[in-house]
Image (cartoon, helix red, strand yellow):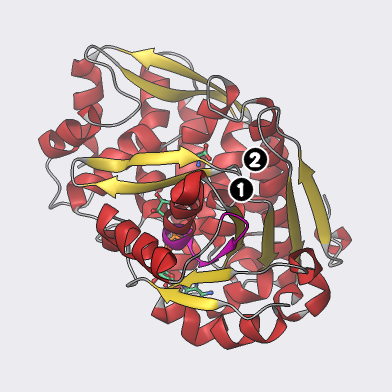
Amino acid sequence: MVFEEVDLKARTLTINFASSKSSTVHIGQGILADPETWTFLNGTTQLALITNPTVRELYGELIQRVLPHNADVFEVNDGEEYKTLESYTALVDSLIRHQYKRNSSIVALGGGVIGDLAGFVAATYLRGVRLIQVPTTLLAQVDSSVGGKTAVNHIRGKNLIGAFHQPEHVVIDTTTLDSLPQRIYAEGLAEVVKYGVIDDAGLFCWIERNQEAILARDPRALQHAVTRSCEIKAKIVERDELESGVRMLLNFGHTYGHGIENAAGYGKLLHGEAVSIGMVLELELSVRLGLCSRDTADRVKRLLASLNLPTRLPNALAAQDIESAMQHDKKATDTQFRFVLVRNLGNAVADYVSDFGLIRAILMETS
Ligand code: NAD
Ligand code: GLY
């Protein structure tokens, strides 16, 4: 798509699921502050807004002004290290204390941490209440708010406790990305590059051509990057809501990535940063297994680096610690790891690899 052709009008995507209700994804500039956006909440009786102090300070008042019903605000400390069972329990305690009923709604306002945590509360409180995702980081807008994965971390591994619970609505206001610190904006770009590599060579080339506008957060660039990413994610999760097939492709970079994130200590390396390094490692694995050309792997690595994303392991991380963290991942069995391997841009496959020597060698060489 030619850059100037990007339409800034708000968009709506509907995702239909076989086993649950559909999700409606609203994408646009300034839609958070538009009361029209929120008419789907008319008639709500109890509304819990779950957020953290950083996001509350930026957007809490704005959203409370336009919501059609007074919301109780519940805060969680800011950071990946608070995506825990303890935070979950504290939130559930609050809902019980406020006598929240089954027909209540939970609004998750924040990045992927708040979305995953509040989502898990919504999935489990009284066996499930209505969830509305309002993602405010790029990573959450292009990935975590869509598709219904909710979870908390365990000391032994990322997202080990969770559930699938589809948000009824996802409200994505791209203007909220203006307040993101540079590093947090960049980590979201890792997931956009991911969609290009696994599914859409056209998107990958578009990112290559428009790096400057993307890094400058040009509204048209944001609109296209977010909309195209959500379209790809919607197409995939509609086909495979519970990750028994094609959805596994969305884990590109995550087998190594989750191990890296866990070994570094939650919050030290951002999720998207760990995924960026993980994608480089999984491309190397694809090259060594004879699936992917060296040129393609180098091209992806160059793009990640020019988007200010890390492509090597931090010095302080030991390959052994990463490997042992990978053993606890959901994508591991006793004898093999499941990886997403790349054949070419836009063409990837999820497969098991049992050559631990090779998996370890790649870790050692990249540190
Ligand atoms: P995050 O939620 O920690 O947000 C990053 C930081 O940005 C936080 O300090 C937050 O307070 C701040 N922030 C949020 N919005 C802001 C704004 N508009 N302006 C300024 N600051 C803002 O991190 P994240 O990268 O959004 O999400 C990472 C999490 O998402 C990880 O836990 C990861 O496992 C999860 N995730 C889940 C899925 C899924 O499918 N459920 C997919 C990918 C990632
Ligand atoms: N972020 C991976 C998934 O939603 O499946």
Residue at (19, 36) in percent of width and height: 325
Residue at (84, 54) in percent of width and height: 2
Q: Position of residue 247 (x, y in %)?
A: 56, 28
Is residue 170 or residue 225 the one in the foreground? 170
Q: Label 2: how many residues lie within 10 Å, few (<14), some (14-19) or many (20+)?
A: many
Q: Name the residue under label 1.
A: 146
Mark 2 is on which residue type?
Answer: Lys
Q: Position of 4 compared to 137: left or right?
A: right
Residue 192 appears in view: yes
Mark 2 or mark 1, earlier in chain: 1
| Extent of the magenta region | 102-114
Q: Where is residue 303 in the image (x, y as percent from the top left)?
A: 52, 49
Residue at (71, 82) in percent of width and height: 66
Q: Position of 290 compared to 265: left or right?
A: right
Mark 1 is on which residue type?
Answer: Val
Does 356 appear above or below 247? Answer: above
Which quadrant is the C terminus positioned in?
A: top left
Mark 2 and mark 1 residues within 8 Å of each other at the beta carbon: yes
Label tally:
2
Q: Mark 2 points at which residue?
A: 233
Q: Does the residue labelled 2 lie within 8 Å of ligand 2?
A: yes
Residue 364 appears in view: no
Query: Rounded to the nearest whole Å, what is the CA distance between mark 2 and mark 1?
Result: 7 Å
Give yes or no for residue 34 being in the magenta stretch: no
Residue at (25, 29) in percent of width and height: 362
Does 36 appear above or below 308? Answer: below
Does 354 appear above or below 217? Answer: above
Q: Label 1: how many residues lie within 10 Å, few (<14), some (14-19) or many (20+)?
A: many
Q: Does the residue labelled 1 lie within 8 Å of ligand 2?
A: yes
